[in-house]
Amino acid sequence: MASLLSISSASSLFMLFFLLFLQAFAPYSTAQEAAGGERRPLVPAMFVFGDSLIDNGNNNNLPSLAKANYLPYGIDFAGGPTGRFANGYTIADGIGELLGLPLIPPFSQVSGNINSAINGVNYASAAAGILDISGRNFVSLIPFNQQIRNFASTMEQFSTILGAQTASDSIARSVLFIGFGSNDYLNNYLMPNYNTRFQYDGDQFSDLLIQHYSNQLETLYNLGARRFIIANVGVLGCIPYVLSQNLTSHCSSEVNNLVINFNSKLQPMLRNLNTNLQGSQFLHMDIYNMFKDILENPRKYGFSVANRGCCGIGRNSGQISCLPFQTPCPNRDQYVFWDAFHPSSAVNIKLARKSFSGSSDIISPMNIQQLATLNP
């Protein structure tokens, strides 16, 4: 740590961290909020792991083909293009806001500047998967295993500045939002230049993913995390990219069945971790069925277009994803999909809100609000 900070700056950072964490831990009265008092965050911090659905800029400086740091990405985001694969908020942004946190910075911005990580860090990287080999067609990315190593580095710096016990207590009360699996199918198993399909059938491949995923989540637990929100894989067979591959623009039952197979094993795995890892809370967020309901009943949710992207080229605006300075649709809040692969920010916000205070058919064994307000 001495190589990162001078003794004097370390002392200043310690005081900053200590005061901010005391504020995060202090009891908060709903009466104070009703009286107009400043709302304190429900948790000390949020740490985010995943792929392009929640990446907020970690790929910007990589030699990667998976980037979104150009317009029209970010067209509805106050800071403009940041690396988010959306017109505005991601689902992680929406959850963080509901928790009372400021926008969580990407790891690429806080590395070497740990004082900016006080409310959490986003480690997500576009094209990343559970398996290290997934997404390699995009050249450079940060797979889940490396994201975990980056988290471990952050925890070491927290322990050095705050002291081991204070850091441990704060991390245990913080939440981790994690979403993986999409690229293990779209940019591995279903890609013609990968031989994965010749090595495993669908059931064997989902077993492989679940085994790796379980070990990775346990590693995060061993690093001090206790409160987890795990999103399952969405309706990949109905995204514009997949719809564009057939003339009838029908969802691919083959792709969706692969996802359903994986998702059917995810929730039991999380239950097993809850049982075997003392003090852990692993929440299962059912993105698949929430998104499926939006696609089947778009008007119920305020959408009018559910079969093509707001920004893209070709059939269903999904054959080529959103290009630099392409003009997107003007009525973005009416679209379920922003581009060939990703939901619009309007959808992201709805998913975040439903998961935050939803019932057990959406998120279980409790919702995010209940997780955040658990007694230590």
Image: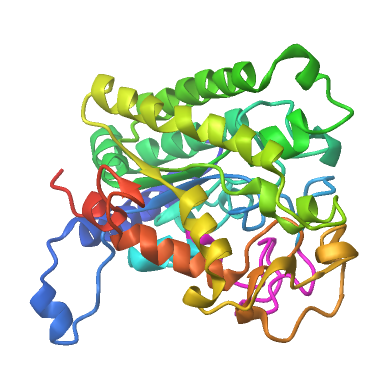
Q: Is residue 227 left or right of residue 128?
A: left
Q: Is residue 326 left or right of residue 201?
A: right
Residue 148, horizontal then vertical, whole percent: 53, 32
Q: Residue at x 64, y 20 (%)?
A: 205
**Image height of 136 relative to 64, above or below:** above
Q: Residue at x 53, y 55 (%)?
A: 292
- Judge by depth and name the residue closer to the eye, 78 or 344: 344
**Image height of 230 relative to 269, above or below:** below
- Judge by depth and name the residue closer to the eye, 22 or 147: 147
The residues colored magenta run: 69-92
Q: Main secondary structure of the magenta part?
A: loop
Residue 223, horizontal then vertical, whole percent: 39, 28
Residue 114, horizontal then vertical, whole percent: 49, 50
> Is residue 58 among the parts visible in the rendering?
no
- Which quadrant of the structure image shows residue 157? top left
- Judge by depth and name the residue closer to the eye, 120 or 269: 269
User: Which image quadrant: the C terminus?
Assistant: top left
Is 73 one of the magenta-colored residues? yes
**Image height of 278 relative to 147, above or below:** above
> Is residue 305 among the parts visible in the rendering?
yes
